[in-house]
Amino acid sequence: SAVISQKPSRDICQRGTSLTIQCQVDSQVTMMFWYRQQPGQSLTLIATANQGSEATYESGFVIDKFPISRPNLTFSTLTVSNMSPEDSSIYLCSVDAGKVNEQFFGPGTRLTVL
Amino acid sequence: AQSVAQPEDQVNVAEGNPLTVKCTYSVSGNPYLFWYVQYPNRGLQFLLKYITGDNLVKGSYGFEAEFNKSQTSFHLKKPSALVSDSALYFCAVRDMTDSWGKLQFGAGTQVVVTP
């Protein structure tokens, strides 16, 4: 398994500002993922981040809105840019680990945009 | 493309009774199936997985799941539910013929266990 931490755990932000969420893993991993979980909803994959390459975004998500960095094999950041109330969600980081690439999740960042 | 269906938004069960959370899937290739649980204000915790082999998979906290290929189902079960099992449960599938092996989640099922 992998132990994943995220910062901040929660934040309340004003419309139009940006927030950067950090994800730290206790071991080196190839693939890291960022998900969004809107209130009362399931998880939606935002993008996949591999070290040394540009993140790959899912349909409906763009780099200008959700820029991602992956500077090394244990760390990634997701920025939520020019926030609106519709961005209020839990943002989760996950990694592939284990024998058959099961994913492990961080505790999430609960974002509220006013 | 793969998909997962969890037909029940909520399951209510009395403590001590058997618990079943339903999941059906659709993939073009071989499915890798997972169950996760989410407690309030917590991230997702991995419960169990099916890759190959025995159709009955045992996982954490006394949970098990049965893979049924003909019915394309992967229902989660626990023989005797606890109040502490009250949480949101997600079924997920990966199609390993996809180069990504991207994880597709179901909508989630809220389990409420009453004393």
Image: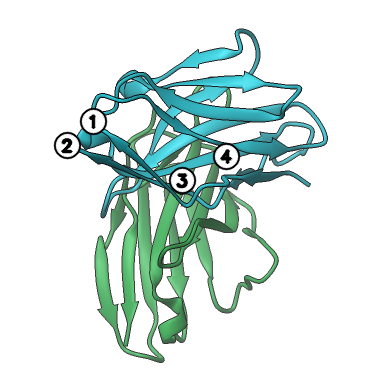
Q: Is residue B63 above or below residue A59?
A: above
Horizontal arrangement in the rendering, residue B105 relative to residue B72 (left or right):
left
Q: Are marks 2 and 1 in contact (CB under 8 Å)?
A: yes
Instruction: Look at discs 2 and 4 and give the one toward the viewer.
Output: 2
Q: Chain B: give its colour.
A: cyan
Q: CA distance from mark 2 to mark 4?
A: 29 Å
Q: Residues within 10 Å of mark 2 (few under 14, many from 20)?
A: few
What's the coloring here? by chain
Residue matched to label 2? B115
In which chain is the residue bearing label 2? B
Residue A102 appears in the rendering: no
Q: Is residue B96 above or below residue A36?
A: above
Q: Residue A46's spot in the image, x, y percent?
A: 57, 61
Q: Which chain can be seen in green? A: A
The residue lying furthest to the top in this view is B54
Residue matched to label 1? B15
Q: Residue B4's spot in the image, x, y percent?
A: 64, 44
Residue matched to label 4? B92
The residue type indicated by label 2 comes to Pro
Q: Which mark is residue A94?
A: 3
| Labels 4, 1: one chain | yes
